[in-house]
Amino acid sequence: MDRFTSVLGHFAPYILFIISILLCLPQKALLLYVFIGFYMNHAINSSFKKFLKEIRPSKNYTSYEWNGEKRVDVIGDNWNGQEYGMPSGHAQQTWFLTTFIYLALKNMWVTLLFLLITINSCIQRVVDNNHTVKQVIVGSLFGIVIAYFYFHLFTKFS
């Protein structure tokens, strides 16, 4: 992957979160639900990682700075559960936001943009060897299912 797509993939959850906030600004309830959902989904992912304890495919964790500089860190004992890769947090967060925004806004162009960023992120996680294909697929499915039920809970109480 080139530098741009690698950086885009690495920061995709945060990029989609910021875009989601901007899109939901006119609708205060929806904005609140995006905030709550993003952090709730993160907590669910962290809990699953600590419960499942499936390690990442490599002891080397690849990340990127905003300027495109690539960093490789060795996963150690002080990673507080992040040494586990099941399910992929990037996949779960990006698919959560993509699904939630699709259900909330039903805008084809926004959904297409979110899909492109999300798919790029999932590919980047595997190419950089931070996750296995299975970890990314499971994270993706978790994100979609959680968003679906969360959205329907949101609409029930709105």
Image (spheres, rainbow, N blue to C red):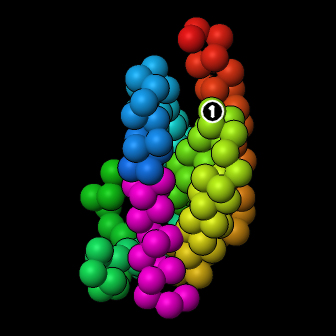
Residue interval drawn in magenta: 1-17
Front one among 31 and 64: 31
- Nearest the viewer among 16 and 83 is 16
Residue at the (39%, 34%) spot, across then down: 25
- List x then y, in percent, for residue 114: 59, 57
Q: Residue at point 46% right, 72% down?
A: 8
- In the rendered structure, does residue 2 fall within the stretch colored magenta? yes
> Dot 1, crowdedness within 10 Å: few (<14), some or many (≥20)?
some
Three-letter amino acid code of the residue under disc 1: Ala
Residue 83 sits above or below residue 51 on the image: below
Q: Residue at x 61, y 48 (%)?
A: 98
Residue at far top of view:
157
Q: Nearer the viewer, residue 148 or 61?
A: 148
Q: Which residue is mark 1?
A: 104
The kind of secondary structure the magenta stretch mainly shows is: helix
Is the N terminus in the top left, top right, bottom left or bottom right quadrant? Answer: bottom right
Q: Position of residue 64 (x, y in %)?
A: 35, 77
Rendering quarter of residue 10: bottom left
What secondary structure is marked by label 1?
helix
**Is any part of residue 84 visible from this angle?**
no
